[in-house]
């Protein structure tokens, strides 16, 4: 029952380093997200699977965790109109089991990988008005709920092997699920720029051809286009896709003072995120200059959504029995998977869809994220035989170009400062906790959209040796 609960809840997480969390597992989280060259417990399956082999032979351990993310996202426009995202609390559980038999360590784990999300609600001032396709005067938008939610979860099966006393290799086969909710208005001006001039993306498909044929005859202007597919489920979005990925890693110990490690996380292979419960709406002015709204029901596919490849290398230094100093460098290949946000909508063959029945509308919005390099450091001090004190920091660049800032996906945070502890409750049980603060990062788009994003996050893990 616990496994099924975690499996259903592990898809929703929110942006820290792009869409990655700044650390996986409370120990790594407290040590600035470092994780490549020392034993991070069962969380090593997400970080570097080779570190799973650093545990004692014959040991088996079950781990339970909870992660809380508390983003603070605020928006403005030319310093006048402001609004805040109401999505400020998200919780993700994790569950794992690892066992070491001889030279082989194996097990399973399930957890949230990461994602993005915002909640601006209904009648938000910043989303009240926009420019129509003609760009003649401001017009009201839908006034309906504006929100986004993207989440990715992993079910992982790792194996680590001790080649020698000092060298461990590891790998993990991962099964993923990704989901998305989206309720978004796009004003007619942006829709028209993409459709007519290829500015910011492109629009194509038979539905666009039919709509274009109406403009100038039965349709005078387009005020906005609205996407709406959402189930309001806190754990899993409306549009869902499934896929696979893998990880490989290595650690090598140079005596008792130094351990080095490296890992590679593959780019995923996820199917299109799809739902048949989508609504696409057009609003504007008809030939008599009367306002109209037309809603079309159908199936939407979010195409080419993938998690990026990641390369990591790190060291762990042990200057004395009580001290450990860690450092990692990580490269996240966002540019290969976040070039554009691509959707394909196909209208149902129903009479209510009128001339749009069976037709398609394909929209690509440019994102052009940049690759991200993350440098992390951490220090652990064993105050007693039971208590370990930890602190760290990570430093990264913002992967989102100002030209493509999007209030629905404000993944612009950069640096994190962390602290935490580990405490052994008994010979078999221990608990770890971490707290991370990401100072506010503010960016302004070419159009005057201002986004501020800060976070206060925490994690808690309990482990028990069987």
Image: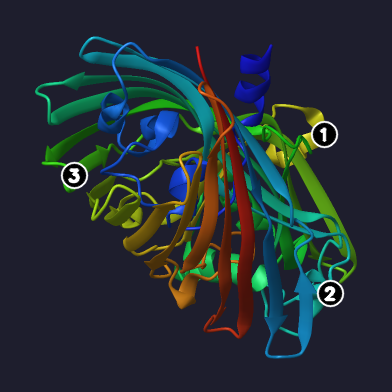
Residue 125 is labelled as 2
Residue 84, compared with residue 463, is above or below; it is below
How is colour applied across the structure in the image? Answer: rainbow
* Secondary structure of the residue carrying numbered label 1: helix
Q: At x 61% / y 70%, what residue is drawn?
A: 453
Residue 352, compared with residue 123, is above or below; it is above
Residue 248, compared with residue 433, is above or below; it is above
Q: CA distance from mark 2 to mark 1?
A: 32 Å
Q: At x 62% / y 63%, what residue is drawn?
A: 455
Number of labelled discs?
A: 3
* Secondary structure of the residue carrying numbered label 2: helix
Q: Position of residue 412 (x, y in %)?
A: 51, 68
* Secondary structure of the residue carrying numbered label 3: strand
Q: Which residue is mark 1?
A: 352
Q: Which residue is mark 3?
A: 259
Q: Position of residue 312 (x, y in %)?
A: 25, 49
């Amino acid at each position: 029952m616990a496994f099924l609960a975690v499996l259903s809840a592990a898809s929703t997480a929110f942006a820290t380093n792009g869409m990655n969390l700044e650390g996986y597992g409370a120990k790594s989280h407290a040590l600035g997200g470092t994780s490549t060259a020392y034993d991070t417990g069962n969380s090593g399956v997400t970080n570097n699977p080779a570190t799973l082999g650093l545990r004692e032979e014959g040991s088996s351990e079950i781990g339970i965790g909870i992660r809380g993310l508390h983003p603070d996202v605020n928006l403005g426009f030319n310093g006048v109109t402001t609004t805040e995202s109401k999505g400020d609390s998200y919780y993700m559980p994790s569950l794992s089991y690892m066992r070491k038999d001889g030279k082989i360590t194996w097990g399973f784990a399930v957890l949230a990988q990461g994602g993005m999300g915002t909640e601006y609600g209904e009648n938000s001032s910043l989303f009240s008005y926009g420019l129509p396709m003609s760009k003649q005067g401001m017009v009201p938008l839908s006034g309906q709920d504006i929100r986004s939610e993207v989440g990715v979860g992993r079910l992982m099966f790792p194996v680590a092997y001790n080649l020698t006393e000092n060298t461990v290799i590891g790998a993990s086969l991962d099964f993923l699920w990704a989901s998305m909710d989206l309720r978004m208005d796009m004003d007619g001006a942006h829709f028209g720029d993409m459709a007519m001039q290829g500015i910011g993306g492109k629009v194509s498909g038979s539905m666009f051809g039919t709509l274009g044929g109406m403009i100038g005859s039965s349709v005078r202007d387009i005020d906005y286009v609205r996407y709406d597919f959402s189930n309001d489920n806190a754990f899993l979005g409306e549009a869902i896709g499934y896929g696979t990925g893998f990880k490989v890693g290595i650690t090598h110990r140079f005596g008792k003072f130094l351990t080095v490690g490296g890992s590679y996380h593959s780019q995923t292979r996820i199917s299109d995120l799809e739902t048949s419960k989508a609504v696409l709406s057009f609003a504007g002015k008809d030939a008599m200059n009367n306002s109209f709204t037309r809603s079309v029901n159908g199936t939407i596919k979010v195409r080419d959504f993938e998690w990026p490849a990641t390369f990591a290398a790190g060291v762990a230094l042990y200057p004395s029995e009580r001290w450990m100093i860690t450092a990692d460098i990580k490269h996240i290949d966002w540019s290969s998977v976040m070039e554009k946000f691509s959707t394909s909508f196909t209208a149902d063959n129903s009479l209510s869809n009128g001339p749009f029945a069976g037709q398609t509308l394909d929209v690509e919005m440019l994102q052009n994220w940049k690759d991200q390099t993350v440098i992390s450091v951490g220090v652990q001090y064993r105050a007693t035989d039971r208590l370990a004190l930890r602190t760290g920091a990570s430093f990264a660049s913002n992967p989102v170009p100002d030209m493509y800032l999007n209030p629905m996906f404000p993944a612009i945070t950069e640096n994190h400062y962390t602290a935490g502890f580990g405490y052994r409750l008994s010979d078999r049980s221990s608990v770890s906790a971490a707290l991370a603060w990401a100072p506010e990062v503010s960016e302004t788009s070419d159009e005057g959209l201002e986004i501020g994003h800060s976070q206060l996050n925490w994690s808690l893990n309990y482990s028990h040796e069987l």
